[in-house]
Amino acid sequence: MRNRSKALATAGALVAATVAGPGLGTASAATPNHRPTVAAHVWITTPDGTDKMADLGTVAFSDAPTTAPTVVVDPSRTFQTMSGYGAAITDSSASVLYTLSPQARAGAMTSLFSPTSGDGLDYLRQPIGASDFTVTAAYTYDDLPSGQTDYSLAHFSIAHDQAQILPLLRQAGQINPDLQILASPWSPPAWMKTGGSLIGGRLIDDPRIYRAYATYLLKFIQAYRANGVRVDAITVQNEPQNRTPAGYPGTDMPSWQEEKVINALGPMLHQAGLGTKILAYDHNWTEHPNDVAATPPDETADIDDYPQQILDSSAARYVSGTAYHCYFGDPSAMTALHNEFPSKDIYFTECSGSQSSDPANTFSDTLKWHARNLIIGSTRNWAKTVVNWNIALDPSGGPHVGGCGTCTAVLTVNPDGTVTRNAEYYTLGHLARFVKPGAVRIASTSFGTTGWNGAVMDVAFRNPDGSTVLVAHNENDNPQTFAVRDGTQAFTYTLPGGALATFVWHGSTGTTGLRPIDPTGWTATANPAGPTDPCCSADVAANAVDDDASTRYSTGTGQAPGQYLQVDLGRRQPVRQIVIDTGTSVGDFPRGYRVTVSADAIHWSTEVASGVGDGQFTTVNLAGNSVRYVRITLTTAAPNNWWSVADIRAYTRGH
């Protein structure tokens, strides 16, 4: 297939694929005679709002071949354990929820937090003091007249929160006992800062100030606990590189100052017997150009390197993970950080919806963007949480002082006392209703990208009860048919254009007796190296071993004898089977191939397997000998067909 856009066309135009391989329904795979029928339950939300978390029944797994591009779910490969999904009961959110009657407010809270009759939200990010969504003047819990100080925090008080915020947090916890809370400050008290203002400035560089600010955060956690609300995690500054907030509290906190605060707070939490985790950073995937332009000379090392600076510092011993926002960059930054610091967790902690230029498109635009970047994009990039910004606002996106004038919330509270569930309610619900506390993300091939490529994008989880959850988004405006394979069986489903869907199934769909080999660290070379056609110049050999089915290697020219793809597995290991997956380019399978293996890439075996591909998956059975290098060489000319490989998977014996 010469043009990559053709490979991303709707399923009706795709070349048929015969499914084969481990977990891919080979004809030779043993199938129990009386296997119980397994069916996936389906819920869908469409961009036009026709379906909103609509229960569309079930679709059965079967052994039947499928002609659709097939996602392979692999529960034996696991990633992060999920912590939860939610938003923030900001000062503004609390105020609009309190415009409702007690009965209507209880109904709104139930719709948000109930695990049985609502969205089941179970993770909140709470401002420590005022944020950009505050009803009146900015505040902290230790405000003093100009020129005064309070190093002992004798004037500390959370009285402001006791009227509305704390009662709502307690109510949320009663509705959902799994609720966790992350707290983040927008500003320390002004007396701790250069400039003496909550808006802008930074902490005064004085050991007394670092101790006082750490004590301030500690007292907040203790005061909330005394009021019946447990704070499970904390960051020490919201968006520390946002040095010029637009009329709302904010603080320029360079990494060297954050390090000092964490080094003071960490021992305090331990001595107080609190299990509250500390998260670093709490800002965008990539530093915004405006923030880069405003970088002072003593912060240049932080440019696009802030989390790394903290995790390489003495404060790292107190840091559980790193928190990210969505307002610049893309979710792949979280995987990059995970690869550098695999022992530290990743949290996604803020993203606001926004009014579209045409308000009639807001639901559709929000559903699509959040599905790609938050619900699937963030979780596929190691995020343990997906947290939106305001949980409720009025129809004008307020009330608030300064800051965002176009932000939307999970709910809109209307002047007549009715409540509108926005796209965020449904995007979060597609995770929170089905992916339970303690669920683990598991491997699944995905064809879509966060930047939008018109394909189907997905992420999969295994719940503590053994059920499997797949969340999928059709990035195309037209319906697309795709298949999902777990074990030796698959189901086929057509997703409406732009739809977000959740599939849940229980039970076994058969096993092959093989287990996958982790592809981390694999490398590949090829001849030809890739296409010269500008359309596909990025289709290099490394894409065949990057564990990402949205990328591929392509020859860039018609298939010819002698073309090859060579994979280095990183070390010698017993390989029982190789699967060559074309991804969505299902017509680009090898018309003829032979396989050779080597332990050193110098001395090669004679041919160990040969055959003809047919559709998306080409399965090659090997003897299980210990090898490091595998070379697939084409043996048949096909001038009108490129050879494309989205993923190479290797299997060994065992479970």
Image (spheres, helix red, strand yellow):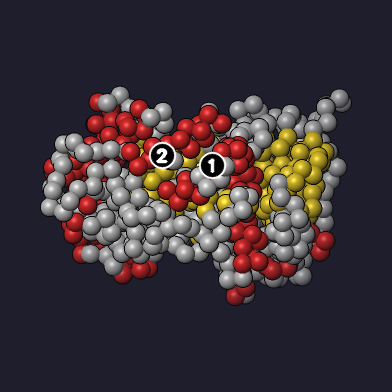
- Counting from the top left corner in percent of width and height, residue 439 is at 57, 33
Image height of 603 relative to 48, above or below: above
Residue in the picture at 30% in, 50% down: 139
User: Counting residues from the N terminus, which is met first, the one under dot 2 or under dot 1?
Assistant: 1
Residue in the picture at 53% in, 43% down: 86
- Counting from the top left corner in percent of width and height, residue 637 is at 76, 65
Q: What residue type is labelled 2?
A: Ala
Residue in the picture at 19% in, 56% down: 196
Instruction: Work out which quarter of the rendered image holds the C terminus and state it.
Output: top right
Q: What element carries label 1?
A: strand
- Give the numbered dot on residue 85: 1
Q: Is mark 2 on a helix, strand or loop?
A: loop
Left or right position of 607 against 316: right
Q: What residue type is labelled 1?
A: Tyr
Instruction: Compare residues 418 and 550 and report the one nearer the observer.
Output: 418
Q: Can residue 240 be seen in this view?
A: no
Image height of 95 relative to 437, above or below: below
